[in-house]
Amino acid sequence: MSTTANGKTGGKSGTWRNWGGTAAARPAREVAPASAAELAEAVRRAAEDGLRVKAVGTGHSFTSIAATDGVLIRPHLLTGIRHIDRAAMTVTVEAGTPLKRLNVALAREGLSLANMGDIMEQTVAGATGTGTHGTGRDSASIAAQIKGIELVTADGSLLTCSERENPDVFAAARIGLGALGVVTAITFAVEPLFLLRAREEPMPFDRVLADFDELWAENEHFEFYWFPHTGNTTTKRNNRSAGPEQPVGRVKGWVEDEFLSNGVFQVANWVGRAVPATVPAIARISSKALSARTYTDIPYKVFTSPRRVRFVEMEYAVPREAVVDALRELKAMVDRSRLRISFPVEVRTAPADDITLSTASGRDTAYIAVHMFKGTPYRGYFTAAERIFTAHEGRPHWGKLHTRDAAYLSRVYPRFGEFTALRDRLDPDRRFQNDHLRRVLGP
């Protein structure tokens, strides 16, 4: 997910905070370039002044990956579509463009991304740079749909890369963590706008695990939410459809997506935070609140949904063949603990890809995401969950909370050394360094 300015601003004395309230920074100065040339000049000036540089997006990363005490690059003037190439079926978009604006603009042009995550508030650079993903049997993360990248490197140069041009940079920069440069534009593969038939229904936890391989194989996009303290899940199956378009009705959509999934769920979490003993009962009610439904709509209206209840999150990518065991261990841990967890656990999949530090790099992957309501103690739960995930060679999502360091990450990413060697070449003085990158990539 992306890391950026959703928080307070104010020039030299402003404080940046992320969406989840888990990271903050007081930069020496803030810059809002309106072009790649202006951004390059900002990087050169920072170097002259001995300041480090970080770009932020919309603050949806939970880590401090974008925090800096140097120069904070805000992207809100670097937005919009540069070019649509219908012959190559690509779109080139400025790095600060929110995914929501891109999705709407593409749909207006009769185009779409092949796959996307479950929210679309992030900027395109923030989302891809941290490895944001949805779920897919055959289609991978947003970064895997990139065909070209333009970025400003540490010396203020503008570098373009693709499979043919600077391919070693392209392999890494699609999920670059902000460590290789500041992305100014991205070229995505697109396809003609299509329809998805969404089927959402409750299913017992034990049945989902028993049938997981079959559910994954039979659906283009399968995911489910398990509600801790219950044996209940909500499953989601999205598959391409010839139509006709049958969107969720306006009233039904408001009741289920806004009133129940956001409004009532917010109140339930307030109650659970104030009186933790009520959480298991709330979880049982929450797990049965949404009824089964089927609808058909354009992709971004199926893949994404509003998320207004604030939370903190940890997500790990484990080998797909290990996900059932990991989930059984997670449920057993919760059942025997005194933890009180009001947020569901989200499970998704992705095929192997060839991006150097992708969580799905070189292996078919399943994702397990654990959440806690903002303001509730989360460390005990996350620590216990992380112990399970790392026992299965889990790779933490780059934009979500975890405690891993370079020593661990270099063991679970076979190409970790390629990335750090490229970083040494592109940013030898660590112009784009911060404390978080020092921990996960090494000094």
Image (spheres, rainbow, N blue to C red):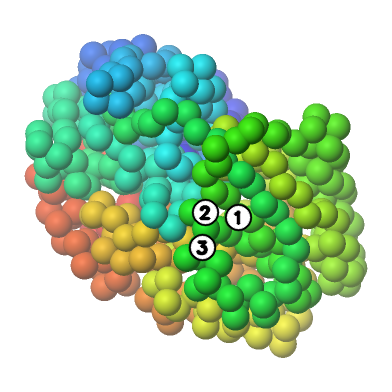
Who is closer to the viewer here, 89 or 167?
A: 89
For the point 80% across and 63% down, the residue is 287
Mark 3, mark 1: which one is toward the viewer? 3
Q: Is residue 14 visible?
A: no
Residue 227: x, y in percent? 73, 67
Does 294 sit left or right of 69 as displayed? right
Checking the image for residue 184, the label placed there is none
Residue 136 position (above or below residue 2): below
Who is closer to the viewer here, 345 or 74?
A: 345
Residue 285 position (above or below residue 245): below
Q: Is residue 323 visible?
A: yes
Q: Which residue is mark 1?
A: 237
The image quadrant of residue 430 is top left
Q: Which residue is mark 3?
A: 218
Is there CB contact under 8 Å for labels 2 and 3?
Answer: no
Amino acid at dot 2? His
Q: Residues within 10 Å of mark 1 (few under 14, many from 20)?
A: many
Residue 328: x, y in percent? 60, 82
Q: CA distance from mark 1 to mark 2?
A: 6 Å
For the point 70% across and 54% down, the residue is 200
Does 404 sit left or right of 412 as displayed? right
Residue 207: x, y in percent? 67, 77
Q: Secondary structure at mark 3?
A: helix
The image quadrant of residue 296 is top right
Quarter that holds the C terminus: bottom left
Amino acid at dot 3? Glu
Q: Which residue is mark 2?
A: 221
For the point 58% across and 76% down, the residue is 211
Residue 330: x, y in percent? 60, 79
Is there CB contact under 8 Å for labels 1 and 2?
Answer: yes
Amino acid at dot 1? Arg
The image quadrant of residue 277 is bottom right
